[in-house]
Image (cartoon, rainbow, N blue to C red):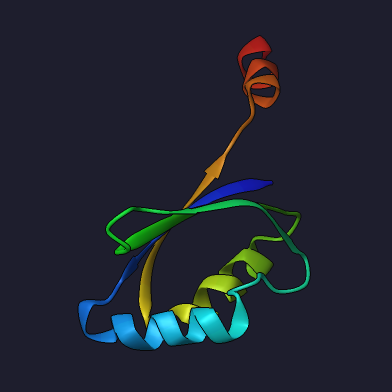
Amino acid sequence: MHFITIWTFKPEQSKDAIERFKATGAMPPEGVTMLARWHDVAGNRGFAISECDDAVAASKWCHEWSDLLTFEVIPVLSDEQLGAVLAG
């Protein structure tokens, strides 16, 4: 499965989030492959595309940061996958 993850800094936690990111690189846990990651130019939120077979692993990644960030995680389909859905 592929996921688009959008995170936003909790305003009172931005300094701590930046320090943790610099120290850890915010890499995903085992079982999750991060395909791409971007940060908005204001530095208040970011976006990642990841792939994993287990939504629990994707949830663990968010949980590791939930004290500092808020998340929206969106499971997505490729054009080919949607085509299979539409074909019935």
Which residue is found at the position 61% from the left and 33% from the top? 77
Quadrant of the drawing holding the C terminus = top right
Q: Which quadrant of the view contains residue 68?
A: bottom left
Which residue is found at the position 65% from the left and 71% from the top? 27
Q: Which quadrant of the view contains residue 14?
A: bottom left
Q: Is residue 37 left or right of residue 34?
A: left
Which residue is found at the position 35% from the left and 53% from the top? 40
Q: Which quadrant of the view contains residue 37?
A: bottom right
43 relative to 22, above or below: above
Task: Decide which of 12, 3 is in the foreground and name it.
Answer: 12
Res. 67 visible in picture: no
Res. 29 visible in picture: yes
Residue 45 on image: x %, y %? 34, 60
Task: Decide which of 20, 82 is in the foreground and name it.
Answer: 20
Residue that lies at the very extreme toward the left in this rendered image: 11
22 relative to 27, above or below: below
Task: Decide which of 65, 18 is in the foreground and name it.
Answer: 18
Residue 26 on image: x %, y %? 58, 74
Residue 42 on image: x %, y %? 27, 58
